Amino acid sequence: MHTTRHRLHAGPVAEAKHPPQNRTSSGMTSGDAPAPTQPECQITTEITSRGLIAILRAPTAEHFPAIADTLFDAGIHAIEITLTTHGALRCIRELTAAYGREAVIGAGTVLTADQAQTCVDAGARFLVSPVAAPDVVRTARAAGVAAYPGALTPTEVHAAGRAGAPAVKLFPASAVSPRYVSDLSGPLPGIPLIPTGGISLTDIPAWTAAGVAAVGLGTPLIGTAVREGVDDRLTARCRQALAAVSEGRAAR
């Protein structure tokens, strides 16, 4: 039991000038240079320490507080509330107030700078986008929070890394495989990846062994709890997911 938080179980909740490019020793311009290793981000470190982001998406956020309690008590502390959910911002505010720095509450499906700023104002500590969304990355960096833009191809992943994202959401992960992550890590070794979309609990070890920073899990982890409420099966799935991360990391 965590005594430092309050439980929540109910309630809905002018043209830019481009500086001259410098030539590297290889003859490439600075704009052509490989993406550097991403700067350290404490929020990302907190998330990747356990290797999971739980994604909550539903018509309404009615059951989200109880789900968050269950996730947290089972050991999953990074929770993404998607903006497509009615009451998402209120839920982010309430969960942030309830958990403080014990949990990492973020927002998902963030597509514009205005949405990003609104989420930051509500207390979100990380912002996830299904697409590149460079304005979201800039807004997040200015506010001191993390942004994980969506990308799939090597070009998209590289561009997201150069934009300053501390990690990149590999989406949809169902379109590729863990081998794809291994292949990307050769030419793009300094960009942490968070595959999301279509990953089952039994898929987690392979993705984690391939070297991903974390995985994003929605329905395979949450199940029907977003519509029907929490039951003991959610806790069991949380434990299975965390064990799967440990299994994959041990196999690296």
Image: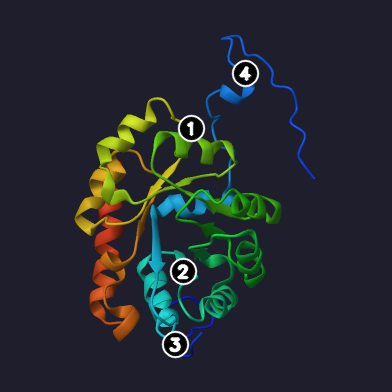
Helix, strand or loop status at disc 4: loop
Q: Nearer the viewer, mark 3 or mark 4?
A: 4
Cβ atoms under marks 2 and 3 closer than 8 Å = no
Helix, strand or loop status at disc 3: loop
Q: Position of residue 230 (x, y in %)?
A: 31, 82
The tag on residue 190 is 1
Q: Position of residue 193 (x, y in %)?
A: 42, 43
In the image, is 164 to the left or to the right of 210? right
Is residue 73 placed above or below 161 in the rendered structure? below
Q: Which residue is mark 4?
A: 29
Q: First in sequence: mark 1 or mark 4?
A: 4
Q: Return the residue found at the far left.
A: 202
Helix, strand or loop status at disc 1: loop
Q: Position of residue 170 (x, y in %)?
A: 39, 47
Q: Position of residue 28 (x, y in %)?
A: 58, 15
Residue 252: in sight, yes or no? no
| Mark 1: few/some/many CA within 10 Å (<14, 14-19, 20+) | some
Is residue 12 placed above or below 235 in the rendered structure? below
Where, quadrant-wise, is the C terminus in this rendering?
top left
Asked which quadrant contains residue 77, the reply is bottom left
State the scheme by which the image is colored.
Answer: rainbow
Q: Nearer the viewer, mark 2 or mark 4?
A: 4
Q: Which residue is mark 2?
A: 82
Q: CA distance from mark 2 to mark 3?
A: 19 Å
Depth order, front residue of 151/102? 151
Residue at left 70%, top 52%?
142
Amino acid type, mark 4: Thr
Amino acid type, mark 1: Gly
Q: Nearer the viewer, mark 3 or mark 1?
A: 1
Helix, strand or loop status at disc 2: strand
